[in-house]
Amino acid sequence: MTSHTADDLVAVRLLRLPVAVYAQAQEHGDALMREFALIAQQLKEHESDHVPARLVGLVEELNQSYAGLTAEQEKILAEAVIHGDVEIPELVWHLPRQVGPAARHLGELRDEAGAYCAGGQHLLTLATPPQAKRFRDWYLGEFIRQLDGEDPTPWPDYQG
């Protein structure tokens, strides 16, 4: 991985992050990733013609390319959920601008995976709950927008 100096990094600030909504979105994402891991394991063991090729590609890309957030932010989020916090006033990442297109692509992949869930044909995981989808759009959108130089939008002000 490329190392970056502080001058190369942009502060991405998520303001007034709703912990319960985050937890719901995270639970759904975790369920989907567990199912993707099972599909990937099944594909390793034997060829499967009943799973669409695009879904197989999604499984591989999500598992390989988007392993999660930095440890510090994950810890803060997990502790907020455990403590039953209502919101996190501010959560900050320091990221290179190149992460913006990756965040956009991750959102597209998650939307595509969500379409498979909603279809109910190839996945057992249910469709993303509307509030969790709205949160994910805000969350990833903040990375995209702020890495493009825009100001943060707090969760309560998000109109998506």
Image (tube, rainbow, N blue to C red):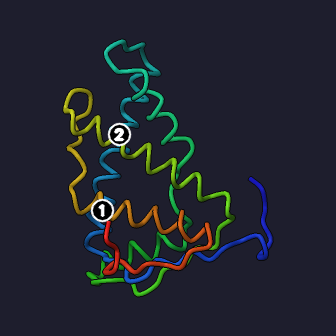
**Residue 86 horizontal/vertical position (percent):** 27, 84
Q: Residue at x 29, y 34 (%)?
A: 116
Residue 12 found in image quarter:
bottom right
| Residue type at numbered disc 2 | Ala
Q: Which residue is mark 1?
A: 134
| SS under mark 2 | helix
Check the image and report above or below for 21 versus 110. below
Image side of residue 83 versus residue 100, left or right: left
Q: How many marks?
A: 2
Q: Which residue is mark 2?
A: 113
CB of mark 1 within 8 Å of CB of mark 2?
Answer: no
108 shown above or below 152: above
**Residue 1 left/right relative to 69:** right
The residue sitting at 26% across, 81% down in the picture is 84
14 sits left or right of 81 in the view: right
Q: Which mark is residue 62?
A: none
How far, Cα to Cα, is label 1 from label 2? 15 Å
Q: Is residue 78 above or below residue 52?
A: below
Residue ID at (21%, 27%) = 121
**Residue 6 location in percent, x, y?**
77, 76
**Whole-percent x, y for residue 87 in the image:** 32, 83
Seen from the viewer's position, the closer of residues 100 and 49 is 100
Q: Indicate the quadrant where residue 49 lies.
A: top left
Please state which of the two labelled residues, at mark 1 or mark 2, is closer to the viewer.
Answer: 1
Residue at position x 21%, y 39% in the image? 118
Q: Earlier in the sequence, mark 1 or mark 2?
A: 2
Q: Amino acid at mark 1?
A: Arg
Q: Quadrant of residue 3?
A: bottom right
Q: Secondary structure at mark 1?
A: helix
